Image (cartoon, coloured by chain):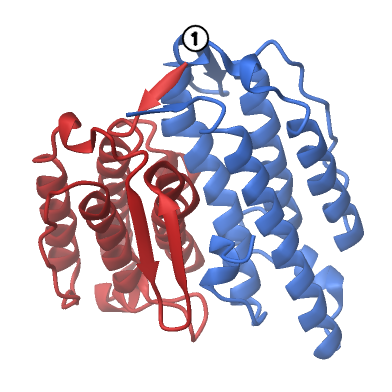
Chain colours: A red, B blue
């Protein structure tokens, strides 16, 4: 009746990152067909005070790798937010997956009770590791994958819900 | 090093539904201040072929209650998709939470290996219970909560990411 902390995090993140790469593939094909500049998609956002597509993908990457760093003794690589093209965003996704693939199930041993503290400018949250994954890391991760999908749909890209769910993966 | 199937589902769903109710509260206050008709928000969508706000909330509700029905021997109540106002959407959220609160941790015993089959018009997926939660139910649940947030941001409602994360809950 239980699920390991590893199963709850690493493969879920890898799967979501692959979904993200698939969304970029479909978006690129759509842009080529419609002769739409890819930069327009990279910079598209749903509201003036929300992150553009590039920022959503950078946050997916950070959420995944930083969650592992917080839950384990494995250090996450630093990826500066410099991506401005589809090729660079794909590379960011690939580097994040490559890092996650180095994480072993045993690295997560005991992480459900590990104390995780998140510090923001105006507040601080402390969680046990399992609560951190369920109340923060997974909701945040899926927020940015879903918002990437939503930005593309909002821009008229021909993708659908199944592309987000990753049926074919 | 493990998390129960109950912890992975019921409290996560209840928390997300409360976040959703909080988003509606802020949206209603914003609409009142800007003298914006609430129906405009209920019917707002990000793309012509995406569900409007009301549909997103109905899918959050269905994803949560149907996941439990698929994982347990508990029957989920049927809630027809008839909501057209904020009051009715709040009621749908409240009824869904009330159902989830009746689910006992022991109802989920053994559900990680229970076979779950989802049938769509053109395809069929079969999962073990834990994979169903991690690869389908949670991604789908958070998709619709995030998209509700995204629709409101896209409509200019003054909410932020912390309202989605549910910091205060």
Q: Can see residue B52?
A: no
Quarter of the image for residue A86 reads bottom left
Q: Can see residue A160?
A: yes
Residue A31 appears at what percent x and percent y? 30, 65
Residue A52 appears at what percent x and percent y? 37, 76
Residue B117 appears at what percent x and percent y? 53, 14
- The residue located at (37%, 37%) in the rendering is A166
Residue A41 appears at what percent x and percent y? 33, 72
Q: Could you tell whether B154 is left or right of A103 in the image? A: right
Q: Could you tell whether B122 is left or right of B81 in the image? A: left
From the viewer's side, name the closer residue of A113 and B122: A113
Quarter of the image for residue A35 reads bottom left
Q: How many marks?
A: 1
Residue placed under numbered mark 1 in the picture: B115
Query: Looking at the picture, does residue A112 appear above or below residue A116?
Result: above
Q: Could you tell whether A91 is left or right of A17 in the image? A: left
| Element type at mark 1 | strand
- The residue located at (44%, 76%) in the rendering is A45
From this viewpoint, which residue is outermost toward the bottom? B34
Q: Chain of mark 1?
A: B
Q: Quadrant of the C terminus of chain A?
A: top left
Query: Looking at the picture, does residue B114 appear above or below residue A92?
Result: above
- The residue located at (53%, 41%) in the rendering is B140
How packed mark 1 is, by other alpha carbons closer than 10 Å (few <14, some 14-19, many 20 or more), is some
């Amino acid at each position: 009746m239980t699920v390991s902390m590893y199963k709850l995090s690493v493969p879920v993140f890898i799967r979501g990152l692959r979904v993200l790469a698939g969304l970029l593939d479909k978006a690129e094909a759509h842009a080529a067909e419609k002769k739409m500049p890819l930069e327009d998609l990279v910079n598209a956002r749903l509201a003036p005070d929300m992150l553009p597509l590039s920022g959503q993908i950078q946050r997916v990457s950070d959420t995944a790798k930083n969650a592992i760093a917080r839950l384990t003794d494995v250090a996450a690589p630093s990826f500066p937010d410099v991506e401005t093209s589809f090729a660079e965003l794909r590379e960011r996704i690939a580097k994040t997956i490559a890092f996650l693939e180095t994480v072993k199930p045993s690295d997560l041993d005991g992480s459900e009770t590990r104390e995780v503290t998140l510090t923001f400018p105006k507040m601080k949250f402390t969680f046990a590791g399992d609560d951190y994954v369920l109340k923060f890391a997974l909701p945040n991760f899926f927020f940015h994958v879903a918002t990437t999908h939503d930005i593309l749909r909002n821009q008229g890209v021909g993708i659908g819900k199944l592309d987000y769910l990753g049926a074919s993966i």
